[in-house]
Image: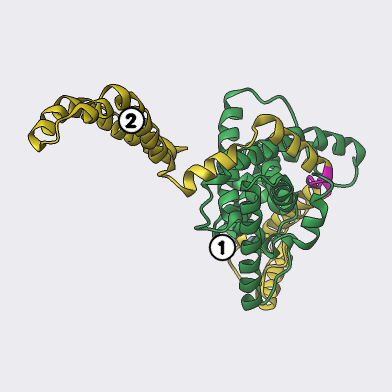
Protein backbone atom coordinates (compact mmCIF):
# COMPACT_ATOMS: atom_id res chain seq x y z
CA UNK A 1 0.00 0.00 0.00
CA UNK A 2 1.78 3.12 -1.24
CA UNK A 3 -1.02 5.64 -0.81
CA UNK A 4 -1.79 6.98 2.63
CA UNK A 5 -4.47 5.23 4.63
CA UNK A 6 -7.91 6.86 4.38
CA UNK A 7 -9.70 8.34 7.38
CA UNK A 8 -12.31 5.64 7.09
CA UNK A 9 -9.75 2.82 7.05
CA UNK A 10 -8.00 4.25 10.10
CA UNK A 11 -11.32 4.70 11.85
CA UNK A 12 -12.40 1.14 11.06
CA UNK A 13 -9.05 -0.15 12.25
CA UNK A 14 -9.81 1.29 15.68
CA UNK A 15 -13.25 -0.30 15.70
CA UNK A 16 -12.01 -3.68 14.46
CA UNK A 17 -14.19 -3.16 11.41
CA UNK A 18 -11.68 -4.27 8.77
CA UNK A 19 -11.28 -7.69 7.22
CA UNK A 20 -8.11 -9.54 8.22
CA UNK A 21 -6.43 -8.78 4.87
CA UNK A 22 -7.39 -5.10 4.94
CA UNK A 23 -6.27 -4.79 8.54
CA UNK A 24 -2.91 -6.30 7.70
CA UNK A 25 -2.44 -3.94 4.75
CA UNK A 26 -3.36 -0.87 6.80
CA UNK A 27 -1.08 -1.87 9.68
CA UNK A 28 1.81 -2.53 7.32
CA UNK A 29 1.43 0.96 5.85
CA UNK A 30 1.02 2.63 9.23
CA UNK A 31 4.23 0.95 10.50
CA UNK A 32 6.22 2.28 7.57
CA UNK A 33 4.64 5.75 7.19
CA UNK A 34 5.36 8.31 9.95
CA UNK A 35 2.49 10.58 8.83
CA UNK A 36 -0.12 7.83 9.02
CA UNK A 37 1.43 6.49 12.24
CA UNK A 38 0.93 9.91 13.80
CA UNK A 39 -2.69 10.11 12.57
CA UNK A 40 -3.28 6.64 13.93
CA UNK A 41 -1.81 7.40 17.34
CA UNK A 42 -3.79 10.61 17.54
CA UNK A 43 -7.04 8.78 16.84
CA UNK A 44 -6.20 6.11 19.38
CA UNK A 45 -5.67 8.80 22.01
CA UNK A 46 -8.85 10.59 21.04
CA UNK A 47 -11.09 7.56 21.17
CA UNK A 48 -9.47 6.35 24.39
CA UNK A 49 -10.18 9.71 26.00
CA UNK A 50 -13.81 9.69 24.92
CA UNK A 51 -14.39 6.07 25.90
CA UNK A 52 -12.90 6.79 29.29
CA UNK A 53 -15.19 9.78 29.75
CA UNK A 54 -18.13 7.43 29.25
CA UNK A 55 -21.69 8.32 28.47
CA UNK A 56 -24.92 8.51 30.39
CA UNK A 57 -26.90 5.53 31.59
CA UNK A 58 -30.66 5.48 31.80
CA UNK A 59 -31.70 4.60 35.35
CA UNK A 60 -34.92 3.99 37.26
CA UNK A 61 -34.64 7.58 38.49
CA UNK A 62 -34.76 8.77 34.91
CA UNK A 63 -37.92 6.76 34.32
CA UNK A 64 -39.55 8.12 37.46
CA UNK A 65 -38.62 11.73 36.66
CA UNK A 66 -39.89 11.32 33.11
CA UNK A 67 -43.20 9.84 34.21
CA UNK A 68 -43.65 12.60 36.79
CA UNK A 69 -43.10 15.16 34.07
CA UNK A 70 -45.50 13.40 31.75
CA UNK A 71 -48.15 13.34 34.48
CA UNK A 72 -47.72 17.01 35.30
CA UNK A 73 -47.59 18.18 31.70
CA UNK A 74 -50.76 16.56 30.50
CA UNK A 75 -53.56 14.33 31.65
CA UNK A 76 -55.46 11.81 29.58
CA UNK A 77 -54.77 13.59 26.34
CA UNK A 78 -53.71 10.52 24.35
CA UNK A 79 -57.03 8.79 24.99
CA UNK A 80 -58.96 11.79 23.68
CA UNK A 81 -56.78 11.95 20.61
CA UNK A 82 -57.08 8.22 20.05
CA UNK A 83 -60.85 8.31 20.29
CA UNK A 84 -61.02 11.11 17.77
CA UNK A 85 -58.75 9.26 15.40
CA UNK A 86 -60.45 5.92 15.80
CA UNK A 87 -63.85 7.34 14.89
CA UNK A 88 -63.30 10.56 13.01
CA UNK A 89 -66.98 11.03 12.21
CA UNK A 90 -68.19 10.70 15.78
CA UNK A 91 -67.96 14.39 16.53
CA UNK A 92 -69.83 15.70 13.46
CA UNK A 93 -72.47 12.97 13.80
CA UNK A 94 -72.95 13.83 17.47
CA UNK A 95 -73.20 17.53 16.64
CA UNK A 96 -75.75 16.88 13.91
CA UNK A 97 -77.84 14.66 16.19
CA UNK A 98 -77.74 17.27 18.92
CA UNK A 99 -78.89 19.97 16.53
CA UNK A 100 -81.64 17.71 15.16
CA UNK A 101 -82.82 17.10 18.72
CA UNK A 102 -82.82 20.80 19.55
CA UNK A 103 -84.64 21.64 16.35
CA UNK A 104 -87.26 18.94 17.06
CA UNK A 105 -87.83 20.41 20.53
CA UNK A 106 -87.98 23.92 19.16
CA UNK A 107 -90.27 23.11 16.30
CA UNK A 108 -92.38 20.50 18.11
CA UNK A 109 -94.82 22.62 20.17
CA UNK A 110 -94.67 25.76 18.06
CA UNK A 111 -93.95 24.55 14.57
CA UNK A 112 -94.37 21.17 12.95
CA UNK A 113 -96.16 19.43 15.87
CA UNK A 114 -98.61 22.26 16.34
CA UNK A 115 -99.11 22.68 12.64
CA UNK A 116 -99.79 18.98 12.07
CA UNK A 117 -102.43 18.93 14.83
CA UNK A 118 -104.34 21.76 13.27
CA UNK A 119 -103.60 20.85 9.66
CA UNK A 120 -106.42 19.83 7.37
CA UNK A 121 -106.11 16.26 6.09
CA UNK A 122 -105.70 17.34 2.48
CA UNK A 123 -102.24 17.18 0.95
CA UNK A 124 -102.40 20.73 -0.40
CA UNK A 125 -103.27 22.05 3.06
CA UNK A 126 -100.34 20.16 4.61
CA UNK A 127 -97.95 21.50 1.99
CA UNK A 128 -99.08 25.06 2.59
CA UNK A 129 -98.45 24.61 6.32
CA UNK A 130 -95.13 22.85 5.80
CA UNK A 131 -93.74 25.59 3.57
CA UNK A 132 -93.15 28.27 6.24
CA UNK A 133 -91.66 25.60 8.55
CA UNK A 134 -89.28 24.27 5.87
CA UNK A 135 -87.33 27.55 6.01
CA UNK A 136 -86.37 26.84 9.64
CA UNK A 137 -85.64 23.22 8.89
CA UNK A 138 -83.38 24.11 5.97
CA UNK A 139 -81.59 26.71 8.11
CA UNK A 140 -81.07 24.23 10.95
CA UNK A 141 -79.92 21.49 8.59
CA UNK A 142 -77.45 23.92 7.00
CA UNK A 143 -76.16 24.86 10.44
CA UNK A 144 -75.79 21.17 11.32
CA UNK A 145 -73.91 20.44 8.13
CA UNK A 146 -71.68 23.49 8.63
CA UNK A 147 -70.91 22.41 12.18
CA UNK A 148 -70.22 18.89 10.99
CA UNK A 149 -67.86 20.21 8.31
CA UNK A 150 -66.08 22.35 10.89
CA UNK A 151 -65.87 19.57 13.43
CA UNK A 152 -64.54 16.97 11.00
CA UNK A 153 -61.21 18.66 10.11
CA UNK A 154 -60.84 19.64 13.76
CA UNK A 155 -61.13 16.03 14.82
CA UNK A 156 -58.68 15.00 12.09
CA UNK A 157 -56.04 17.58 12.91
CA UNK A 158 -55.83 16.84 16.64
CA UNK B 1 -47.04 2.76 38.62
CA UNK B 2 -43.29 3.07 38.35
CA UNK B 3 -42.75 0.00 40.52
CA UNK B 4 -45.14 -2.04 38.46
CA UNK B 5 -43.36 -1.07 35.28
CA UNK B 6 -40.52 -3.36 36.23
CA UNK B 7 -42.38 -6.56 35.41
CA UNK B 8 -43.33 -5.12 32.03
CA UNK B 9 -39.76 -4.45 31.08
CA UNK B 10 -38.34 -7.65 32.44
CA UNK B 11 -39.87 -9.52 29.53
CA UNK B 12 -39.52 -6.62 27.12
CA UNK B 13 -35.76 -6.63 26.66
CA UNK B 14 -33.98 -3.89 24.76
CA UNK B 15 -34.50 -4.27 21.02
CA UNK B 16 -31.74 -6.48 19.59
CA UNK B 17 -30.72 -3.70 17.24
CA UNK B 18 -30.04 -1.48 20.24
CA UNK B 19 -28.71 -4.05 22.62
CA UNK B 20 -25.64 -4.84 20.60
CA UNK B 21 -26.42 -8.50 19.95
CA UNK B 22 -25.94 -9.30 16.28
CA UNK B 23 -28.20 -12.21 15.39
CA UNK B 24 -28.18 -14.05 12.11
CA UNK B 25 -30.29 -12.00 9.73
CA UNK B 26 -33.42 -14.18 9.68
CA UNK B 27 -33.52 -14.45 13.45
CA UNK B 28 -32.98 -10.73 13.75
CA UNK B 29 -35.85 -9.94 11.42
CA UNK B 30 -38.14 -12.26 13.33
CA UNK B 31 -37.13 -10.75 16.63
CA UNK B 32 -37.62 -7.26 15.27
CA UNK B 33 -41.15 -8.18 14.22
CA UNK B 34 -41.84 -9.57 17.68
CA UNK B 35 -40.46 -6.43 19.32
CA UNK B 36 -42.56 -4.24 17.04
CA UNK B 37 -45.67 -6.24 17.92
CA UNK B 38 -44.94 -5.95 21.61
CA UNK B 39 -44.41 -2.20 21.28
CA UNK B 40 -47.68 -1.82 19.41
CA UNK B 41 -49.49 -3.66 22.19
CA UNK B 42 -47.88 -1.38 24.78
CA UNK B 43 -48.89 1.69 22.77
CA UNK B 44 -52.49 0.45 22.54
CA UNK B 45 -52.59 -0.11 26.29
CA UNK B 46 -51.03 3.29 26.96
CA UNK B 47 -53.67 4.89 24.75
CA UNK B 48 -56.34 3.10 26.73
CA UNK B 49 -55.00 4.92 29.80
CA UNK B 50 -52.73 2.26 31.24
CA UNK B 51 -49.82 4.25 32.59
CA UNK B 52 -47.61 1.28 33.32
CA UNK B 53 -47.67 0.37 29.64
CA UNK B 54 -46.26 3.81 28.86
CA UNK B 55 -43.76 3.36 31.69
CA UNK B 56 -42.62 0.15 30.03
CA UNK B 57 -42.04 2.04 26.77
CA UNK B 58 -40.05 4.70 28.65
CA UNK B 59 -37.91 2.05 30.32
CA UNK B 60 -37.42 0.22 27.07
CA UNK B 61 -36.36 3.21 25.02
CA UNK B 62 -34.94 5.51 27.68
CA UNK B 63 -31.35 4.45 27.06
CA UNK B 64 -31.18 4.99 23.27
CA UNK B 65 -33.04 8.29 23.62
CA UNK B 66 -30.73 9.52 26.37
CA UNK B 67 -27.71 8.40 24.34
CA UNK B 68 -28.92 10.37 21.34
CA UNK B 69 -29.65 13.42 23.49
CA UNK B 70 -26.24 13.34 25.12
CA UNK B 71 -24.55 12.85 21.77
CA UNK B 72 -26.37 15.97 20.61
CA UNK B 73 -26.05 18.26 23.60
CA UNK B 74 -22.82 17.05 25.23
CA UNK B 75 -24.31 18.12 28.51
CA UNK B 76 -25.66 15.61 31.02
CA UNK B 77 -28.34 17.85 32.53
CA UNK B 78 -29.51 19.10 29.18
CA UNK B 79 -29.58 15.58 27.75
CA UNK B 80 -31.72 14.39 30.65
CA UNK B 81 -34.06 17.32 30.25
CA UNK B 82 -34.32 16.79 26.51
CA UNK B 83 -34.99 13.07 26.83
CA UNK B 84 -37.82 13.81 29.29
CA UNK B 85 -39.19 16.40 26.90
CA UNK B 86 -39.15 13.82 24.12
CA UNK B 87 -41.15 11.33 26.16
CA UNK B 88 -43.66 14.04 27.08
CA UNK B 89 -44.05 14.71 23.36
CA UNK B 90 -44.42 10.97 22.75
CA UNK B 91 -47.17 10.78 25.36
CA UNK B 92 -48.97 13.75 23.86
CA UNK B 93 -48.72 12.45 20.32
CA UNK B 94 -49.17 8.76 20.96
CA UNK B 95 -52.56 8.86 19.26
CA UNK B 96 -50.83 9.91 16.07
CA UNK B 97 -48.78 6.74 15.93
CA UNK B 98 -50.70 4.71 13.39
CA UNK B 99 -48.49 1.66 13.30
CA UNK B 100 -47.43 2.16 9.69
CA UNK B 101 -43.82 1.98 10.87
CA UNK B 102 -42.52 0.36 14.02
CA UNK B 103 -42.89 2.35 17.22
CA UNK B 104 -39.11 2.64 17.54
CA UNK B 105 -38.82 4.14 14.05
CA UNK B 106 -41.51 6.68 14.91
CA UNK B 107 -39.96 7.44 18.31
CA UNK B 108 -36.43 7.85 16.95
CA UNK B 109 -37.64 10.21 14.23
CA UNK B 110 -39.39 12.31 16.86
CA UNK B 111 -36.25 12.25 19.02
CA UNK B 112 -33.97 13.25 16.14
CA UNK B 113 -36.19 16.21 15.34
CA UNK B 114 -36.21 17.25 18.99
CA UNK B 115 -32.40 17.09 19.03
CA UNK B 116 -32.21 19.23 15.89
CA UNK B 117 -34.58 21.79 17.42
CA UNK B 118 -32.61 21.90 20.65
CA UNK B 119 -29.35 22.22 18.75
CA UNK B 120 -30.71 25.16 16.75
CA UNK B 121 -31.95 26.87 19.88
CA UNK B 122 -28.68 26.37 21.75
CA UNK B 123 -26.72 27.74 18.81
CA UNK B 124 -28.58 31.02 19.29
CA UNK B 125 -27.42 31.37 22.86
CA UNK B 126 -23.76 31.56 23.88
CA UNK B 127 -22.02 28.41 25.08
CA UNK B 128 -22.06 28.28 28.84
CA UNK B 129 -18.95 26.18 29.10
CA UNK B 130 -17.77 22.63 29.01
CA UNK B 131 -19.99 19.70 29.83
CA UNK B 132 -19.89 19.21 33.55
CA UNK B 133 -18.88 15.59 33.62
CA UNK B 134 -16.08 16.11 31.08
CA UNK B 135 -14.41 18.73 33.26
CA UNK B 136 -14.94 16.52 36.30
CA UNK B 137 -13.30 13.66 34.49
CA UNK B 138 -10.38 15.78 33.44
CA UNK B 139 -9.74 16.46 37.11
CA UNK B 140 -10.27 12.89 38.24
CA UNK B 141 -8.18 11.22 35.54
CA UNK B 142 -5.45 13.68 34.65
CA UNK B 143 -2.95 11.13 33.42
CA UNK B 144 -5.29 8.53 31.97
CA UNK B 145 -5.05 9.99 28.49
CA UNK B 146 -2.67 12.38 26.84
CA UNK B 147 -5.56 14.53 25.57
CA UNK B 148 -7.73 16.35 28.04
CA UNK B 149 -11.33 15.12 27.99
CA UNK B 150 -12.67 18.63 28.46
CA UNK B 151 -10.70 19.74 25.42
CA UNK B 152 -12.07 16.87 23.35
CA UNK B 153 -15.65 17.66 24.33
CA UNK B 154 -15.12 21.33 23.58
CA UNK B 155 -13.81 20.43 20.14
CA UNK B 156 -16.69 18.00 19.59
CA UNK B 157 -19.10 20.88 20.14
CA UNK B 158 -17.76 22.53 17.02
CA UNK B 159 -18.67 19.52 14.84
CA UNK B 160 -21.91 19.47 12.89
CA UNK B 161 -24.78 17.78 14.71
CA UNK B 162 -24.67 14.74 12.39
CA UNK B 163 -20.95 14.13 12.89
CA UNK B 164 -21.15 14.85 16.60
CA UNK B 165 -24.02 12.44 17.12
CA UNK B 166 -22.32 9.63 15.20
CA UNK B 167 -19.01 10.12 17.00
CA UNK B 168 -20.42 10.38 20.49
CA UNK B 169 -22.89 7.56 20.05
CA UNK B 170 -19.92 5.39 19.10
CA UNK B 171 -17.10 6.55 21.34
CA UNK B 172 -18.90 7.90 24.39
CA UNK B 173 -22.14 5.93 24.50
CA UNK B 174 -20.52 2.80 23.07
CA UNK B 175 -23.15 1.95 20.46
CA UNK B 176 -22.26 -0.32 17.55
CA UNK B 177 -22.36 0.93 13.96
CA UNK B 178 -25.56 -1.05 13.39
CA UNK B 179 -27.24 0.45 16.45
CA UNK B 180 -26.32 3.96 15.34
CA UNK B 181 -27.71 3.20 11.87
CA UNK B 182 -31.06 2.23 13.41
CA UNK B 183 -31.17 5.22 15.73
CA UNK B 184 -30.25 7.68 12.99
CA UNK B 185 -32.18 5.87 10.25
CA UNK B 186 -29.19 5.85 7.91
CA UNK B 187 -27.22 3.06 6.21
CA UNK B 188 -24.28 1.54 8.11
CA UNK B 189 -21.96 2.84 5.38
CA UNK B 190 -23.04 6.40 6.21
CA UNK B 191 -22.37 5.74 9.89
CA UNK B 192 -18.87 4.57 8.98
CA UNK B 193 -18.09 7.66 6.94
CA UNK B 194 -19.59 10.04 9.52
CA UNK B 195 -17.57 8.53 12.36
CA UNK B 196 -14.39 8.62 10.30
CA UNK B 197 -14.99 12.23 9.25
CA UNK B 198 -15.80 13.25 12.82
CA UNK B 199 -12.67 11.63 14.22
CA UNK B 200 -10.48 13.23 11.56
CA UNK B 201 -12.06 16.65 12.13
CA UNK B 202 -11.70 16.33 15.87
CA UNK B 203 -8.05 15.31 15.59
CA UNK B 204 -7.40 18.26 13.34
CA UNK B 205 -9.22 20.67 15.64
CA UNK B 206 -7.19 19.48 18.61
CA UNK B 207 -3.92 19.80 16.74
CA UNK B 208 -4.41 23.51 16.20
ZN1 LIG C 1 0.81 7.13 5.03
User: Is the residue at mark 1 from the same chain as the one at mark 2?
Assistant: no
Instruction: Please give the residue where the numbered disc 1 appears in the rendered image.
Output: B189
Q: Position of residue A29 (x, y in %)?
A: 68, 68
Image quadrant of ligand 1?
bottom right
| Res. A158 mark | none
Identified at 67% across, 75% down, the residue is A19
Identified at 78% across, 62% down, the residue is B11
Q: Secondary structure at mark 2?
A: helix
Q: Position of residue B151 (x, y in %)?
A: 76, 37
Please determine whether, in this image, residue A37 is positioned above or below residue B123.
below
State which quarter of the image contains the C terminus of chain B: top right
Residue B191: which quarter of the image? bottom right
Q: Closer to the camera, A40 or A143?
A: A143
Q: Is residue B196 in view from this perspective?
A: no
Q: Is residue B30 left or right of residue A92?
A: right
Q: Which residues are magenta?
A: A52-60
Instruction: Please give the residue where the numbered disc 2 appears in the rendered image.
Output: A104
Q: Secondary structure at mark 1?
A: helix
Q: Is residue B206 in view from this perspective?
A: yes
Chain identifier of the green chain: B
Chain under disc 1: B
Amino acid sequence: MNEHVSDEQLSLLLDSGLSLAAREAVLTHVRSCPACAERHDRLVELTATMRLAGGLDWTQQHTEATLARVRSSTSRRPQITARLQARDWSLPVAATLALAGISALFLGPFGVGNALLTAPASASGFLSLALPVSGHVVLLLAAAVALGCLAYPLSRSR
Amino acid sequence: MVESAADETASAALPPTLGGVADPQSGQLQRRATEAGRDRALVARALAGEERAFAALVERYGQPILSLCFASTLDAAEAEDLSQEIFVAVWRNLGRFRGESSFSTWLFALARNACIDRSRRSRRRPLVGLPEHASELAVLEPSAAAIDAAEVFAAARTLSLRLRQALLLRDVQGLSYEEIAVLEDIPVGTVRSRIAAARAALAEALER
